[in-house]
Structures are given as structure tokens and as C-alpha cells.
Image (tube, grey):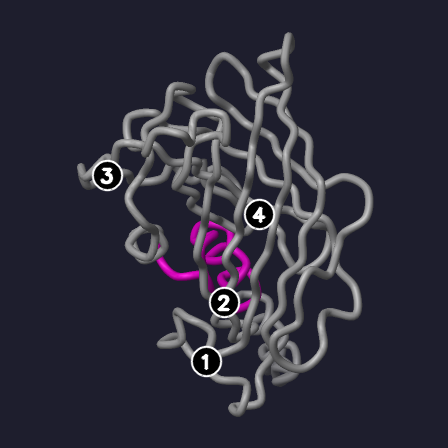
């Protein structure tokens, strides 16, 4: 008759390690499935934008704006994309990207007074891109970025060029994109609405599209398109 042996005591450190791995995996999966985490919902981003401008170039050319808040960095970002088609190459785009960024609370949709001690600056860069027959757009910075204005404190010590990829939905006049700059922005969602027509078409005021958009993004990996 053999003597029964008791199982060796469990190492609590291993149990904690397993729990930590499960938690980490869950957090990673959540971040993967909720790419707008920290930047508000798509509806919140959309609600901050002015009405859309309907232009002769139905899909692309014009001035596009996004308006997002980062809960992680506690700051606001207003991107302005000015996109023009290259003459003779309608699938190629040129223009500029401007970023107006300021620190603040979720209630500071407009820059607060400098007396509160936060930062407020504007940078810009030249940009190039392309648009395909399916309205898929790439528009990214080229060359060197420029510090256009410092309104509070100093400007950024450095800045990575922005690169927006996504699809323009002509039915709601929006550019549903993600930004990747090789640094802070990794598949960072940004909803753009066209707010002005190209300069050559600006002699006549653009008509406003008052219809409320009904868009629910399709999630793909870390981004949504």
C-alpha cells in the first residue's frame, strides 16, 4: 500500500502572474476593439463640427476639420486639412495640415485663458496624398513642420508629421480617418467634415448640408474606417 502524498503548495506569485497576464490580455483586446478609447465617441466628435459644405468637387477638394479630446493627455486637438487635386492628376492630392492643440478639461472645447497655466499652440506642415475610385484617401505631412503660433507657454519641443488614412463618405460629407504619426498617434480616430470649398470655388458661399449623419463605424483592427 502506497502512502498518499499531498500536492505541493501553490506558488501565489505564479497565480498573480497568471491573473496579470489575463488582465493584460483583456486590456489589450479592449483597446483593439475600442479604438476611440480616450478620444470620445464618434458621435461626440461629430457633434463639435460645423455643418458640411457641399462643393462642386463632391468628394475631396476643400477644407476639412476634426475636433477631438484626449482623456489620456488631457488636451484638445483641432486638425484642419486643406486638400486640392493636382491638375491633370485628379487622383493625387496636395495641400496642408494644421494642428491647433491646447490643454484643458473635457469642458474646454475652446482654448481656456492662459492664466490657467496650460499650453496653446498651432503647427502646420505641407502635405501630399491620393484618393482612389472607392474614395479611400491618404493625406500625410511632408518636409518640415512649422510652429505657426504660440498662445500660451512654449510650443512643442518636437513634432511628428501626421498621416491620415480613411474613407470619404459622400452621403454624409465626412472623412472617417485614423492618424498615425509614429509617436503619440497610433490608429487615432478623427472624424473630419468639409467646412469650406476650395478657394477657386469660394466666390459663392457653399450651401450647407443640414441633414444629420447616421454613421456607425466598422471596426478593423486598431482603427475604424
Residue placed most toward the observer, 198 or 33: 198
Q: CA distance from mark 3 to mark 2?
A: 23 Å
Query: Which residue lies at the image location 41% right of the left edge and 70% below the top edge?
Result: 110
Q: Secondary structure at mark 1?
A: loop
**Residue for badge 4:** 187
Query: Which residue lies at the image location 57% right of the left edge and 83% below the top edge?
Result: 118
- Density class for disc 3 (Cα within 10 Å; few <14, some 14-19, many ≥20) is few
**Residue for badge 1:** 112
Q: CA distance from mark 3 to mark 1?
A: 30 Å
- Density class for disc 2 (Cα within 10 Å; few <14, some 14-19, many ≥20) is many
Q: Earlier in the sequence, mark 1 or mark 4?
A: 1
Tell me where the magenta segment starts and ends, as one range.
Answer: 23-41
- Density class for disc 4 (Cα within 10 Å; few <14, some 14-19, many ≥20) is many
Q: Secondary structure at mark 4?
A: loop
Q: CA distance from mark 1 to mark 4?
A: 28 Å
Residue placed most toward the observer, 134 or 52: 52
Q: Nearer the viewer, mark 1 or mark 4?
A: 1
**Residue for badge 3:** 213
Is residue 37 rendered magenta in the image? Answer: yes
Position of 157 with respect to 48 (left or right) is: right
**Residue for badge 2:** 76
Q: Earlier in the sequence, mark 3 or mark 2?
A: 2
Q: Nearer the viewer, mark 1 or mark 2?
A: 1
Amino acid at each position: 500500500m502506497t502512502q498518499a502524498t499531498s500536492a505541493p503548495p501553490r506558488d501565489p506569485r505564479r497565480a498573480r502572474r497568471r491573473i496579470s497576464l489575463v488582465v493584460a490580455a483583456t486590456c489589450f483586446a479592449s483597446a483593439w476593439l475600442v479604438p476611440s478609447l480616450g478620444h470620445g465617441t464618434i458621435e461626440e466628435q461629430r457633434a463639435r463640427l460645423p455643418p458640411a459644405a457641399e462643393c462642386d468637387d463632391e468628394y475631396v477638394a476643400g477644407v476639412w476639420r476634426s475636433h477631438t479630446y484626449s482623456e489620456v493627455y488631457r488636451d484638445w486637438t483641432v486638425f484642419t486639412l486643406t486638400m486640392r487635386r493636382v491638375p491633370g492628376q485628379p487622383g493625387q492630392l496636395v495641400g496642408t495640415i494644421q494642428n491647433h492643440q491646447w490643454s484643458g478639461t473635457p469642458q474646454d472645447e475652446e482654448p481656456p485663458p492662459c492664466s490657467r497655466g496650460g499650453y496653446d499652440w498651432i503647427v502646420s506642415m505641407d502635405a501630399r496624398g491620393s484618393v482612389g475610385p472607392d474614395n479611400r484617401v491618404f493625406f500625410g505631412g511632408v518636409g518640415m513642420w512649422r510652429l505657426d503660433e504660440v498662445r500660451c507657454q512654449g510650443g512643442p519641443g518636437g513634432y511628428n508629421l501626421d498621416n491620415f488614412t480613411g474613407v470619404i463618405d459622400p452621403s454624409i460629407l465626412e472623412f472617417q480617418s485614423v492618424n498615425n504619426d509614429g509617436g503619440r498617434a497610433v490608429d487615432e480616430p478623427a472624424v473630419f467634415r468639409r467646412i469650406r470649398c476650395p478657394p477657386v470655388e469660394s466666390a459663392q458661399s457653399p450651401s450647407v448640408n443640414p441633414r444629420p449623419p447616421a454613421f456607425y463605424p466598422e471596426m478593423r483592427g486598431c482603427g475604424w474606417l
